Amino acid sequence: MIDLIKKYYLVIAALLVVVIFVFISLSPEESKLVFEPITNNEIVEVTKYIYVDIKGEVMNPGVYKVEDLTRLFQVINLAGGTTIDADLLAFNMSLKLRDEQVVYIPSIYDDYPLITEIIENSQNGIVNINTASLELLDTLPGIGPTTAQNIIDYRQENGDFLNIDDILFVVGIGEATLNEIREFITI
């Protein structure tokens, strides 16, 4: 028998290779090695951050890095909440914040019970239509209290104006009014 195995050694080895090949080819599909390129078509959203400066009657005033579309109450919470002297009726806690915004939380002892945002360029008579209060918008030529409120309502519903001409979307403002106030406004 050993002489027979030695004589047919190569034939037995070849037959063994064929049996292994047949066994592998008949195995289930999931055990086969197949090259499939990995394609990742998922869109990864990058979180946009903004910086907001909060001052006044908060426990820890300062500049806070927050996600875009953060609301005022969230930044107040980050700042440790309001002090006991904060006038809670003077500001809109649901206000959407924007990058580089400065928010002042007034005291109950302040003379003005309205939310007061420090407005860039306000000392030179330029009104920022994205941040101005109703009273400040009302100082613009041709803009009365109703139109000023329409500007604020538009801002709250649609977000900040991206350019000055976007103010034409506000009810009560046409080309003539825009031309009259153009030199007095900014975004």
Image (cartoon, rainbow, N blue to C red):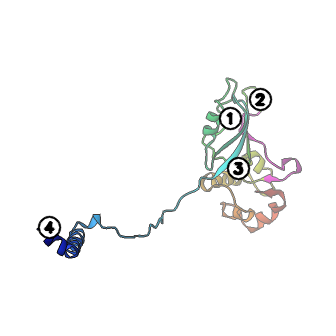
The residue positioned farthest toward the left in the image shown:
1
Residue range (magenta): 112-127
Dot placed on the residue nearer the N-terminal end, 3 or 1: 1
Check disc 4 and report the residue beneath it.
2
Distance Cα–Cα, label 2 vs label 3: 26 Å
Q: Are marks 1 and 4 in contact (CB under 8 Å)?
A: no
Whether the residues at callouts 2 and 1 have beta carbons within 8 Å, the answer is yes
Badge 1: residue crowd in 10 Å (few <14, some 14–19, many ≥20):
some
Residue type marked 4: Ile
Mark 4 Cα-neighbour bin, 10 Å: few <14, some 14–19, many ≥20: few
Q: CA distance from mark 3 to mark 1?
A: 22 Å
Q: Residue furthest front?
A: 3
**Mark 2 or 4, nearer chain start:** 4
Q: Quadrant of the N terminus?
A: bottom left
Q: Nearer the viewer, residue 28 or 52?
A: 28
Residue at mark 2? 110
Residue 9 lies, in percent from the top left, at 21, 72
Name the residue that disc number 3 marks: 99
Looking at the rendered image, the quarter that the C terminus falls into is: bottom right
Separation (CA) of disc 1 from disc 4: 103 Å
Expressed as whole percent of the image width and height from the top left, the position of residue 62 reads 73, 36
Mark 4, secondary structure of its residue: helix
Circles 4 and 3 in contact, beta carbons < 8 Å: no
Residue at (75% x, 25% y) in the render: 109
Q: Which mark is residue 90?
A: 1
**x and y, in percent, of residue 52 in the image:** 70, 43
Q: Is residue 117 visible?
A: yes
Up the image or down, 27 lies above or below 149; here it is: below
Query: Magenta: predominant secondary structure element?
Result: loop
